[in-house]
Amino acid sequence: MPRVVILETERAASAAVAGFVARLLAATPDLVLALPTGRTPIALYGALVECHRSGAADFSQATVFALDEFVGLPPSDPRSFRAFLRRHLLDHVNVARGRIHGLNGTAKDWKKEAAAYELKIGRAGGLDLAIVGIGRNGHVGFNEPARRLPARTHRARLLPETRRANAGAFAGRWRDVPAHALSMGIGTILNARGVILLAFGGHKAAIVQRALTGPITTLVPASLLQLHPNVVVVLDRAAARSLTRARKILPRD
Ligand code: PGA
């Protein structure tokens, strides 16, 4: 069972993770990060921006890789994940332009794009820390539940529930959400030296419990994180409420 840290609120949990990342950056300025999009990391990014403004987080030597991207949206599209990361984090901290990497959702040859991404991650020295969320169906990045999962960066077909969960940026019309995405593979994520899984809210409680305490299965891609020796799961109280038998670490403030 991975280590689980539970804080009372999403805000407190996000601030704790931001503090951890800031300390990591101080110790390892050339940190290589994989970063997610979605609702979950927004408070974390806000807290990281605050850390940066107060002088506590210096990203000048850091490298960032986006975890995934919609197919069909150019990086300039405000609904793209690249734009999301810029809006919430990268426009407000000092990551060097040349060290910000994302998948190009409009690449003509996705296999080439995916292979080039893996190569770039390798050239950067591999991922030091992958920060990931979890979908209600157990996906990590856009590694959707399936009998077989591609290990490496690939083009993924999005399940209807995932398209519905992403409909917000598409005026609520889930059919307008791209049907495919490019995503780091579960193997790419498991190769990171450290992984932080974030989940907030009661709607994530059931899948958090399955992912952390259920069998390891590709039908719950996040359950594969149980195999990683250095995963920390950071939850608010609501997302942790089904973890009755879990060993919980409750930091005091
Ligand atoms: P969310 O998505 O942060 O919007 O809940 C998480 C995910 O689908 O990975």
Image (cartoon, rainbow, N blue to C red):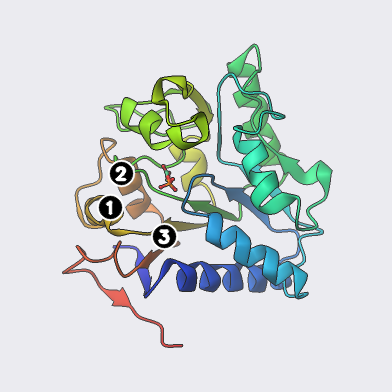
Residue 49 sits above or below residue 98 on the image: below
Question: Does the Cβ of the disc 2 residue fall within 8 Å of ligand 1?
Answer: yes
Is 5 situated left or right of 95 in this image? left
- Amino acid marked by disc 2: Arg
The residue to which callout 1 is attached is 203
Residue 68 sits above or below residue 129 on the image: above
Can residue 6 be seen here?
A: yes
Mark drawn on residue 136: 2
Nearer to us: label 3 or label 2: 2
Q: Position of residue 167 (x, y in %)?
A: 43, 32
The picture quadrant where one finds residue 186 is top left
Question: Does the Cβ of the disc 1 residue fall within 8 Å of ligand 1?
Answer: no
- Marks 1 and 2 sit apart, C-alpha to C-alpha, by 7 Å
Q: Describe the element under mark 2 as helix, strand or loop.
A: loop
Q: Describe the element under mark 1 as helix, strand or loop.
A: helix
Question: Are circles 3 and 2 on residues that touch, CB within 8 Å?
Answer: no
Residue drawn at (65%, 33%) of the image? 78
Mark drawn on residue 229: 3
**Ligand 1 falls in which quarter?**
top left
Q: Position of residue 232 (x, y in %)?
A: 43, 64
Question: Are circles 3 and 1 on residues that touch, CB within 8 Å?
Answer: no
Residue drawn at (72%, 45%) of the image? 124
The picture quadrant where one finds residue 193 is bottom right
- Marks 3 and 1 sit apart, C-alpha to C-alpha, by 27 Å
Earlier in the chain: of badge 3 and badge 2, it is 2
Q: Position of residue 129 (x, y in %)?
A: 57, 56
- Marks 3 and 2 sit apart, C-alpha to C-alpha, by 24 Å
Between residue 59 and residue 90, name the one nearer to us.
90
- Amino acid marked by disc 1: His
Residue 11 sits above or below residue 168 on the image: below
